[in-house]
Image: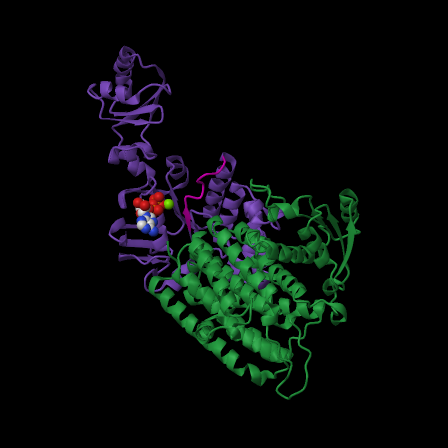
Chain colours: A purple, B green
Amino acid sequence: MPPILELHDLVKKYGDFAAVKGISFDIKEGEIFSLLGPNGAGKTTTISVLSTLFSPTSGDATICGHSVTREPMEVKRCIGVVPQELALYEDLTAQENFNFWGSMYGLSGKALSSRIDEVLEQIGLTDKARQRIKTYSGGMKRRVNIGVGLLHKPRLLFMDEPTVGIDPQSRRAILDSVKELNRQGMTVLYTTHYMEEAQELSHRVGIIDHGELIALGTQAELTRQVQETDTLILHIGENEDPQALIDALKDVPGVLRITPTNHEVAIVTPSAEELIAPVVTRADRLGIKVHSIDIREPNLEAVFLHLTGRALRD
Amino acid sequence: MSTRKIFHVALKDVCLIFRDRSALILMLLAPFLLTIGMGAVTGRFSGSSTNSGIADIPLTIVNADAGQLGDALVEMFTSPDLEALLDSTISTDLSAARAAVDNDESAAVIYIPAGFTDSIIPSPQRSAPPELVQVEFYANPTRPTSSGIVRTILEQFLSQVEIGRISGEVTVTQLLANGYIDPAQAAAVGTSIGQQMVQSSGSTSSIKLINVTEGGGEVEFDTLAYIAPGMALMFLMYTVTYGGLLLIKENRQGTLARMLISPTTSAQVLGGKVIGIFLIAMAQLLILIGGTSLLFGLKWGDPLAVLVLVFAAAFAATGWGIIIAAVFKTPGQVGSVGSALMLIFGLLGGSFFDVSSLPGWVQIISKISPNAWGMEGFLNLAHGGSIVSVGTPVLALLIMGAVLFCAAAFWISRRGLARK
Ligand SMILES: Nc1ncnc2c1ncn2[C@@H]1O[C@H](COP(=O)(O)OP(=O)(O)O)[C@@H](O)[C@H]1O
Ligand SMILES: [Mg+2]
């Protein structure tokens, strides 16, 4: 079976600035594929081109067997899109929003109203359907935003950072519903800058940074690249200076790379156990108090750190 | 191309505007109240000639001023001109007057505090600038129309008293509240509305009334038949600007992009937006025409011809709304340009005074406004003209609309419908 989505050397420039610099990958029907990358990596730009909002500067993509540049109408019918920013009418109710967006997808009459009931059920807003969106909480708005993308039962669903800025329960509910949709047969392209989400959801992950796809594969394939390395996380006090600690530790044998994050210092090393003693001694000598130490098995964060030298949430 | 989607886009915009209270106030209530206010100062409501549905509005005036302005205000409200419209009681007991409003026995209280006259006309003996004393207005919220009428008349009076404290206050406040103009512009807009109102109310005789139809028969002509279309056409520009703003807002809030990534063409989306604005504009004019006919018994003329003219005026004005939205980028720009056009077109189009007394070149320039053509048509009809008499204005309005749509379509096709 041919892939449901194929990208060939896709380039998108805004003026002179290349936001996407020639990326290629494909997605098989039935997969959850995550595009993982920090803010500004080019995730939304990629989704915008794939959903035919912008034409690519060069390259092409084929979705459901149709080219995004030459047969955009066919592509639009096959995909559902959940944009990163809420795109709803706040002065209309959820029901009215669904009615409007459903009609934009050519649904009408009984078929539309029963589908709206299903979606309302799915996002758990049946009893709030007749209230205006502007009275909703952030999490509820996000769920309506997702619901709109599901109305026409797309074969392929794009979700662009659907959990940004919401409470943990709503986030949990969204992640569960992505898995449920996938179980029912929907293919999902999911973008995020949260390593944990990519890890939990995806069959395969593409890591994107500065408009380039720097790694692609299953999680096992990706972490194998950093198999030989552990990550040691030192938690230090809020008033401590991580830079001083980094300067003191960078020439310790066994430290491959060392980077600061929030009140933490992350050290990539082939062997974490052997490093603990010298690290603690040096910190102590500087008078920096280390509250706790974690050893992390190789994960997607480590892959990103390994490939770019930066933490995902810089 | 499916026209159903166009219709859905249009219907959604109609729905959105009818949910926006401040927009509705400006679209419908403001022109209505201004019509009444101007009608009141021009003596429209005098004696028996009124057959309006609104009459004998109960009102209490408490005058503690003991100065010439307070007396003048009382005199105006009790004048024979307003006798049929208002039922004014003069009282000295403010709290009793307020209680009457609270008990729904009265629509409003006007309280003229002591020192009101002095605060505006400084006595020669005093050198220090007087403290500002303001007339207070206490409205009955369950009678918004009646109290709105009283308030408008009151503001008419105040604008005649002092240009700086302008009757346009209501309008300007609403424009501001709606984010439609900057606070920085408010004073200027207020002043120019106010000045125009003072001019028009002070010089009502400059409105030329022609009482003869083409057939030679006498037709009763009513000053409201001049004022009402002027106000309706002026606020028509507000409505189409609002429509243009909806397009800009949809671009900002991402719903425009979302429509464009659904299986809907840009032509369908744009077509829907245009038809939406057009329908709102039509609805506004028809409601104002219906309202003034029912409430004041105003005769607009041959209904079919009125409908044709309304169609053409809404079409041309929609063209202006779309071109502003196509050319300008931010909601602020669109709002400012729209409110400027509303005033300029209002002035040129004769919403405030009769332009036929102005120099010829001004009259020629005025023809770029839908207001001028609309006024010409409505006046012809009010004078008893048939559908033939609006042939030229209708044609001119349709051409104006078509030219503006082509220009807007060209502009939009060059830069795309959605933009960042
Ligand atoms: N309309 C635009 N014009 C110019 N630059 C843009 C535009 N949209 C995004 N960018 C830039 O392109 C880069 C990628 O942005 P984006 O695709 O939104 O990243 P992400 O979704 O991964 O956070 C960023 O540097 C951003 O500033
Ligand atoms: Mg993004």
Q: Position of residue A248 (x, y in %)?
A: 23, 18
Q: Is residue B226 above or below residue A7?
A: below
Q: Position of residue A133 (x, y in %)?
A: 56, 48
Question: In front: B261, or B338?
Answer: B338
- Residue at 35% x, 23% y: name it: A263
Question: In front: B172, or A67?
Answer: B172
- Residue at the limit of the structure toward the front, as seen here: B125
The range drawn in magenta is A158-167
A159 within the magenta span: yes
Question: In front: B130, or B289?
Answer: B130
Q: Is residue B403 above or below residue B252?
A: below
B365 within the magenta span: no
Q: Quadrant of residue B282?
A: bottom right
- Residue at 27% x, 19% y: name it: A245
How many circles with numbers are drawn on the protein? 0
Q: Is residue B134 visible?
A: no
